[in-house]
Amino acid sequence: MKTQVSAQAKKLLPLFVFATFIAAPAWAATQTVTLAVPGMTCAACPITVKKAISKVEGVSKTAVNVDKREAVVTFDDAKTSAQKLTRATEDAGYPSTRKN
Ligand SMILES: [Cu+2]
């Protein structure tokens, strides 16, 4: 009986994770901000910037555009803030400012 339950739970887990992911914006206060990162000048810069931002706890998505010199970051505002994101890029050598 026990093994049956756990097998069923295993089956349901991906569905649960998926449902949580879909439902997340409703309760987790997910925010998306655009950061201006003027210091990005070559193709390698966005890799560094993306890595620095992705390391911040609560960040779920990072898209860096070197041509626009900006980073669009999606994060859980219960875990981090735009200020922490700009600090993270600055610590990596790329000072940034919030655009929106
Ligand atoms: Cu570069």
Image (cartoon, rainbow, N blue to C red):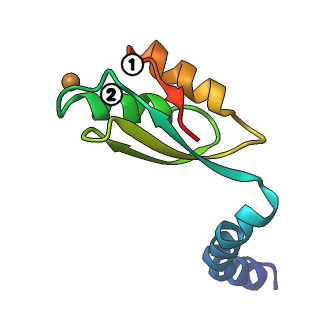
Location of residue 97 with respect to 8 vertically, above or below: above
Tell me the residue at 63%/82% (across/down): 11
Q: How crowded is mark 1: few (under 14 residues within 10 Å), some or many (20 or more)?
A: many
Tell me the residue at 53%/37% (across/down): 99
Location of residue 26 with respect to 63 vertically, above or below: below
Label 2 secondary element: helix
- Quadrant where the C terminus is found in the figure: top right
Choose between 3 and 9: the one closer to the eye.
9
Left or right of 46 on screen, residue 100:
right
Q: Nearer the viewer, mark 1 or mark 2?
A: 1
Task: Provide residue 2's location: percent of width, then percent of height.
Answer: 81, 79
Task: Provide residue 66's location: percent of width, then percent of height.
Answer: 27, 38
Label 1 secondary element: loop
Asked whether mark 2 lies closer than 8 Å to ligand 1, one says yes
Left or right of 42 on screen, residue 90:
right
**Residue bearing mark 1:** 94
